[in-house]
């Protein structure tokens, strides 16, 4: 977090006070220590602390640089907004008072020194700048997960999307592979990122519709607005799949991708084992013919058993083929439910009720 905080510009009441870290706990300690030095009794010190804790949260406007996204214009997705690098000073002037703006845009200032990076803005309510920065960065990572899910197609070539600046070289994690038997050694590296960035300017209508839908759900959750089961499941899938993609551990990828599939098709109230339920429903929904459904069911059963062994602390070999297959299945299921969103979008009281009826109809065909 310390590496990220320095990139965040936070709103302050005074243009003369800027801090990279400002934790609520520090303010509480200051109240306590000042109270002791001024001979305040415990009740008064406690009252001051409670007044601080119960005070109204302040609004912090955060500007966070990102890498891996090409932006020809700004993209407004509700509470998360994407901007090209050249708009930084304009956004600063529009959202901060004169003192803060003068400080941040001066050549001598090192605060917010990321002129060459595109960035995201987000407003956060918090009692402290430190907590605001944690919330803001967390939400920006979730927003980037939405983009990762849309643009990535396989495990070998991933867009290097993230907060702050990207790795300076593909050789950052270089290692050596050698064999005495072959009398040969070579340098290698696990770098799997594509050498170019996601281009928002080439989004088609379907891509824009997906982004607007997912950012709308994220915004609802962020603002504590009412959400429906399918909305939460879809966003959960996006975060799980993105997490599974951006890891070098196949076991972790398998657990994440299988959890994403479960988030869409698993139903605790259904009178069937979870393994059987997940594998059967996946096959029924995605497979178009009996043979294809049988193939999917067989593969999913084997992979679910592997996942169960891992989850219960056992050891089993997970291959790239395993996780690649689950990634493709999770993607297919996600877009299946997104395309039929209105049909499957039940209420909170009858979660996945429509799905249950639909699966029965497919089985009795």
Image (spheres, helix red, strand yellow):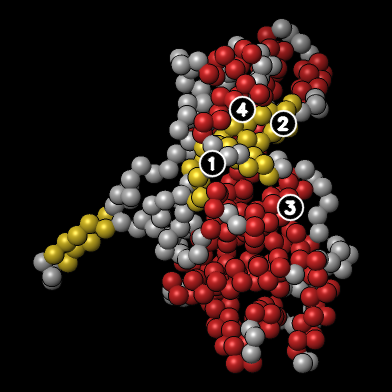
To which residue does mark 3 refer?
217
Is 7 above or below relative to 269?
above
**Residue drawn at point x = 50 percent, y = 15 percent:** 106
The answer to the question of whether label 2 and label 4 lie on touching residues, with beta carbons closer than 8 A, is: no
Badge 4 local density, few (<14 within 10 Å), some, or many (20+)?
A: some
Which sits in the foreground, 271 or 173? 173
Left or right: residue 221 versus residue 72 is right
To which residue does mark 2 refer?
126
Closest to the camera, between mark 2 and mark 1, is 1
Question: Earlier along the polypeptide chain: callout 2 or callout 1?
Answer: 1
In space, the residues marked 2 and 1 are separated at their CA atoms by 32 Å
Which sits in the foreground, 224 or 361? 361
Q: Which mark is residue 72?
A: 1
Question: Earlier along the polypeptide chain: callout 4 or callout 1?
Answer: 1
Is 245 above or below relative to 23?
below
Closest to the camera, between mark 2 and mark 3, is 3
Question: Residue 237 placed where, x, y %?
Answer: 64, 62
To which residue does mark 4 refer?
91
In space, the residues marked 3 and 4 are separated at their CA atoms by 25 Å
Question: Residue 311 placed where, x, y %?
Answer: 57, 69
In space, the residues marked 4 and 1 are separated at their CA atoms by 16 Å
């Amino acid at each position: 977090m310390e590496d990220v905080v320095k990139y965040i510009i936070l709103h302050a009441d005074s243009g003369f006070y800027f801090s990279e870290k400002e934790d609520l706990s520090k303010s509480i300690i200051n109240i306590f220590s000042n109270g002791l030095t001024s001979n305040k009794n415990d009740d008064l010190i406690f009252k001051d602390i409670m007044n601080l804790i119960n005070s109204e949260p302040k609004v912090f406007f955060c500007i966070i640089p990102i890498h891996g996204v090409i932006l020809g214009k700004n993209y407004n997705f509700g509470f998360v907004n994407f901007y090209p690098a050249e708009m930084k000073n304009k956004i600063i002037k529009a959202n901060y008072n004169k003192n803060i703006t003068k400080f941040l845009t001066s050549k001598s200032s090192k605060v917010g020194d990321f002129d060459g990076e595109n960035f995201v803005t987000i407003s956060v309510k918090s009692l402290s700048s430190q907590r605001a920065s944690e919330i803001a960065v967390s939400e920006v990572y979730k927003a980037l997960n939405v983009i990762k899910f849309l643009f990535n197609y396989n495990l070998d070539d991933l867009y290097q999307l993230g907060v702050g600046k990207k790795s300076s070289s593909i050789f950052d994690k270089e290692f050596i592979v050698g064999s005495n038997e072959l009398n040969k050694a070579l340098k290698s590296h696990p770098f799997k990122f594509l050498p170019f960035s996601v281009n928002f300017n080439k989004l088609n209508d379907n891509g824009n519709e997906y982004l607007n839908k997912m950012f709308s759900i994220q915004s609802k959750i962020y603002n504590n607005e009412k959400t429906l089961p399918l909305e939460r499941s879809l966003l959960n899938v996006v975060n799980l799949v993105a997490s599974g993609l951006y890891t070098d551990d196949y076991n972790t990828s398998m657990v994440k991708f299988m959890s994403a599939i479960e988030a869409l098709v698993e139903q605790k109230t259904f009178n069937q084992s979870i393994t059987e339920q997940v594998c059967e429903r996946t096959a029924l929904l995605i497979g178009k013919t009996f043979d294809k459904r049988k193939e999917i069911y067989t593969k999913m059963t084997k992979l679910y058993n592997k996942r169960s062994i891992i989850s219960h602390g056992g050891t089993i070999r997970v291959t790239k083929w395993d996780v690649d297959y689950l990634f493709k299945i999770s993607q297919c299921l996600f877009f299946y439910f997104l395309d039929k969103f209105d049909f499957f979008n039940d209420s909170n009281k009858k979660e996945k009720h429509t799905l249950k009826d639909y699966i029965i109809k497919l089985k009795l065909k």
